[in-house]
Image (cartoon, rainbow, N blue to C red):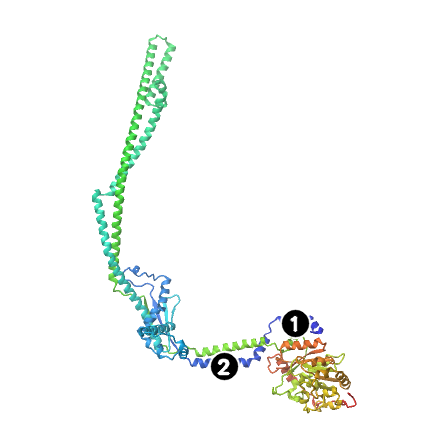
Amino acid sequence: MTVQNMNSQGAEHPERMLQEEVIDLRQYWRIVDRFKWRIAALSVAVAMLTAMVVFSMTPRYQATATLMIEAEQPKALSIEEVYGLDSSRKEYFLTQFEILKSRRIAEEVVNRLNLVNHPEFDPDQQSPSLKARIKGWLPFLASREMESEEEARQRKLESVTDAVSSRLSIAPVRNTQLVKITFESESPELAAKVANMVAEVFIDSHLQAKLDMTKQATSWLNDRLEDLRVKLEQSESRLQTFQEQEGLVDVSGVQGLAAQELNQITSQLIQARQEFKQAESIYSLVQSRGADVDALASLPEVLNHKLIENIKQAEIDTARKVSELSRRYGPKHPKMISARDELESVQDKLRSEVRRLISGIHSDYETAQANVVALERELQQAKTEYQMVSRKETRYNELKREVDVNRQLYSAFLTRFRETSETSGFEAANARLMDPAVAPRLPAKPKKALIVALALVVSAMLGVMLAFLLEALNDGIRNPEDVENKLSQRMIGVLPWVDHDKRERLSLATFFDSDQHSFAEAVRTLRTSVVLSHLDRPAKVISVTSSVPGEGKTTVSENLGFALSQMEKVLLIDADMRRPSVGKEFKLPPYHPGLSNLIAGSNTLAECIYHDEKSGMDIMPAGTVPPNPQELLSSPRFAKAIEVLKSKYDRLIVDTAPAQVVSDALIVSRIADSMLYVVKADSTRQKLVNNGIGRLLQVGAKLDGVVLNQVDTTSKSGYYGEYYTYAGEYAYRAPGVSENVQSIKPKATSEDLEVA
């Protein structure tokens, strides 16, 4: 990359950088437009091939029958437990759908309609498949052992059943109890028959299963009833024997009396124990006071006795009376004596009552103790009797429960047996055919127009994708953006593609052809770019090269010389002495002397130059092809010859060999004031071009820029299409002025240059 290019890229405007980040849809459209005929050809070819395949296919018809599955089946009696079906659950309907899809239903349909022998399903009546043909061609693959007739029949039935199942589709209608049964066949009548037969077989299979289940239930119930009857009789006999042995009439009454008696004795024992504890405590106090009556009289239990309280009150009253009389009378007074006698009588009575009360406490203690012992003995006897009654009741209840259970089981099975027997002849289907299938008039498959249209659209999309893929894989140079971004060089000119035979070179008359004004204008634009690139110091020696042969470097050199010769004296030098072509273009004979003869000194300058009258430009062909072109170009004679020619001509255009093939262009670049690098648009790979430019820059070549040659400008959607359309409309020529402008400057003579 040159310093100038690096500076130009570093000073790139921010707005331009922002624009580069935006997706340019026009660029995608240009790619599509460039490959549009290929995309169209691919789409048409695929559509035609698809149409041929589709229209050769056998049409298939679809017939649909509508079946309604009952959610609540009519029942004569409540025996749904026998069948184990709960039609209110979602799983019930899902189960019915799967039964419709089952292999058993499909096999029954095959048997009823005899589809095994139908031409559409019978393998023996159909042409063998490609797989079967291959096996027939390769005997070692046919390793099937000899099978019996029954095995062959079963294998054939399985094959037909698989074929029928694959063409059968079951589709439940959402939020309803309806289900669509659809069958596909080459025959519309057969499609309708199979769809209706599937519904019929489904209904019949349910009825048959229900009948079989009823028979099995009846047989099983009958066997169980006899066993239950025997068990019931045995249990009743055991209960009766137990009652007779134990003399039980009403076990519950006996149990109640025993419980009541036990409760009463328990209550009496509790009360007796309380009284005994109380008597025991009083008895203990009395024993602790001994025989002292006064001490015994002071006991709370004695004092609190009613009789003692009365005697105590009488003693207090008598003592008060004695006290009052003693203050009034003397000791020997009869009233005093009477009062004392009364007091002593009361005290004696108190002592007597205390002794009798103490004696009563002893008696109460012994009585309470005896009462507790008697009640405890009675309670123990009542418990024993109660436990005995409880054991009898437990055994009685066990025998009675066994009788009740056997009686209930026997009654339930007897009822179920009678229900099953009565309903065995009642057939209630779980589904009914709502809408039978009819033979369709139009085929359902294949949808020929849709398939062809889809093939056309898909192939077009595939073509567009391939176009983008080819565009992404192609690393050629197409436009100025590629020159700047991929090559980091300035594009100095663009030459459009001119229609001509690709096996031949572009005619020299193209520049002067009035019908090719766009090409001539592009050459003049290149001339202007070259001249303006060297305003301060005109480039007299302009070298033109390319990466590989066939990119049009010679054509660029010739037409640039035509454009410059209209204003200056120009000499076109063919320095490609390996594959010279300038002399052939101008119809010069192979033996015409040229550059190699001039450098070698075998001919003079005048002999080596040819003047073209039409363009006014001088041409120096390559001359005799030397065995060592690089040595001639590296010799001082070549540099001296260029210096002499520079003094005689305004411009020297040197057509050199490709830079990637040989090193001739590198040698010529040392004496050239300007170099133009020709790149064939959308042809030469980026890496090859970069390598060639890099080699020139390494030796210090003065590379002015890249000339993009053979650019396709025919499409208006292309990069240059719109510009060249406007240019074609705007092209003009001044009236009376000939494009064949002759150079008015004199040609060089033999005396102007002498090479020894």
N-term mark: 1 or 2: 1
Residue 545 visible in the displayed image:
yes
Name the residue carrying label 1.
16
Q: Is residue 148 left or right of residue 600?
A: left
- Residue type beneath disc 2: Ala
Q: In this view, does 47 lie to the left or right of 664?
A: left
Q: Which of 386 and 443 is in front in this view?
A: 386
Q: What element carries label 2?
A: helix
Q: How many other residues sit within 10 Å of disc 2, few (<14), some (14-19) or many (≥20)?
A: some
The answer to whether 427 is drawn above or below residue 257 in the figure is below
Name the residue carrying label 2.
45
The answer to whether 364 is drawn above or below residue 544 in the figure is above
Numbered disc total: 2
Work out which quarter of the rendered image holds the C terminus and state it: bottom right
Q: In this view, does 249 lie to the left or right of 315?
A: left
The answer to whether 314 is drawn above or below residue 223 in the figure is above
Residue 436 visible in the displayed image:
no
Q: Residue furthest front?
A: 140
Q: How many other residues sit within 10 Å of disc 1, few (<14), some (14-19) or many (≥20)?
A: few
Q: Which mark is residue 691?
A: none
Q: What element carries label 1?
A: helix
Work out which quarter of the rendered image holds the N terminus and state it: bottom right
